[in-house]
Amino acid sequence: MLDKELFTLLGANKKFVWLTVVVMIVGLFANLAVTASICWAVDITIRLTQGEGEAIAFVYPAIVAVAAIALRYAATRVTGDLRDLLGRKVKKDLRARMYDKILRLGARSADGMNMAGLTQISMEGIEQLDTYYSSYLPQFFYSMIAPFILFLICVWLDWRVALVLLCCVPLIPLSIIAVSRYAKRVFAKYWGKYTTMGDGFLDSVQGLNELKIYKADGARHKKMNENSEEFRKITMKVLVMQLMSTMIMDFVAYCGAGAGIAVVIANLAGTFGTALLPAVALFLVLVAVEFFLPLRALGSAFHVAMNGASAGKKISGFLKAEEPVWGEGACRGTDLALEDVSFSYDGKRDVLRHASLSFPAGKMSAIVGASGCGKSTIVGLLIGALRPKTGRVTAGGDPLEALSRESYYSRVAVVSYNSYLFNDSVRANFELAKHDATDEEIWAALEKVNLADFVRENGGLDKVVTEDASNISGGQKQRMALAVNLVADKDIYIFDEATSNIDIDSEAVIMRNVREMSRRKNVIIISHRLENVVPADTIYYMEDGEIKERGTHAELMAMQGGYAHLYSTQKALEEGYKEVLA
């Protein structure tokens, strides 16, 4: 019923839970005071009918009742405010922690969670978890304490009634526990189906053009309907489970209260000896219901909370995901190296084996090879998103994990085929890379990537780049991302297929600027088009996760090995393509 893992997620916000419980207990005493004042007034009424006492005596229970009602009202208001405050603080704290975790993980994900699932958990999942923390958790602790408080009060009046009521109270949590075993499985499936449906919907929207082209939209529509139907069925199971458990809890609560009232009536008749006073009997009857109300409310909150708890498990798992280790040291140099590095994604098959590469400052280095040979893995290791299984990655001679992330990233820029541009003006995108970038610097960078004329003719630097850069071509997007990184003026540039969608003329302009940059910077190029790496000072040729050849273009061609074969084949294909076009 109480998940310790989710409870620890509260952090410093636990104090609001305890404070809410204290105020709820104050409200309980106020309720008891109102009940006692009613019974007091009944006792005075009975005495007056017997010719005892005076009517003025009604003033005292009236004063107690008014004061208790005022206190109860205040406690209710404060409880609501505290729950609202607890919910808002928990949501703010969890979202901040999720965001920080995403930043620390970088390009990685946890438990196979993609962006759609992560977005659902970060938004709606945390909203559902709000109910668990603000409603269920305070009610849980209050429900554990309230019956004992009532027992201590009632046992002083009649121990038999108090004992019967106390013995019946655990039947409600036992029924909740029995239901929870089934409920956990149902809610786990619920969130699984929910995130799967969301992932599928986002995937279908993003690939709508392809679905239309392949005429597969009908099949995808059928699949989405099947996912929706599965989600509807699991939702119905959730509702049925909630209704059935509510009925069970109501039955237990009414039966328990009835058993307590039956004992009160028996005592009132003197069945067990001395008869109870009518006012005392009335108080016990009214309090008998109070015994079960907290746990009954807990049962109602339980089902809503379970939904949030399932999301909370995913959030907790994400927050516990292993992340790259970083230190506190400053990055002192810009020479990068991999020293006898092996790496595996699944811990079984090594995708990189005993790789040793050196990337000196003021030089252009290149990594080439067929798809799947390990080039992108090396990029992940160089930027710190991945950590080697064996060996080490160094920057300026220091292990990467000994450096601070901020110090290292302040000197590294990665330009890839999918570099992101923000939904903002051209100028704003450049200012993200360098906050004080001048218009002259921006135009100079755009000239270097052969994009200045396009920007001038389409709104200038105030032109807004739409979401996912949908209002410019793929090649223009890549060139603009490259220009942004040029303005950032880093010491280390890693180009990961940065010219894959760019025309030959623009590619020639860009590569000329890259070669010029390599005289001052550490430039690393990963490219399938081998013509781009011909000027490199060192070329590493990879096959199946191993460095098979290294050297300049001329040296590798002279070896007549894998690189020479790949280059010659690619050159022949390009020449044949030119002849066809001619």
Image: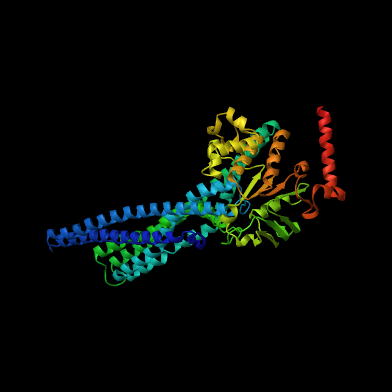
Residue at 62% across, 30% down: 453
Outermost residue on the bottom side: it is 273
Residue 205 seen in the current view: no
Q: Is 87 on the left-hand or right-hand side of 282? A: right
Residues 495 and 345: in front is 495
On the question of residue 16 being in view, the answer is yes
Between 4 and 31, the one nearer to me in the picture: 4
Where is residue 260? Give x, y as percent.
36, 63
* Residue 26 higher or lower than 197, as above or below: below
Rendered image coloring scheme: rainbow
Q: Residue at x 85, y 45 (%)?
A: 565
Give the percent coordinates (x, y) of residue 186. Answer: 56, 52
Quadrant housing the C terminus: top right
Q: Residue at x 62, y 61 (%)?
A: 401
State the image quarter where residue 149 is shown.
bottom left
Q: Position of residue 441 (x, y in %)?
A: 57, 39
Viewer-closest of 571 and 240: 571
**516 or 349: nearer the viewer:** 516
Asked if residue 231 lies left or right of residue 90, the reply is right
Residue 514 is drawn in which quadrant? top right
State left or right for residue 416 relative to residue 314.
right
Q: Quadrant of residue 346?
A: bottom right
Query: Residue drawn 83% across and 45% down?
Result: 566
19 left or right of 204 in image: left
The count of marks equals: 0
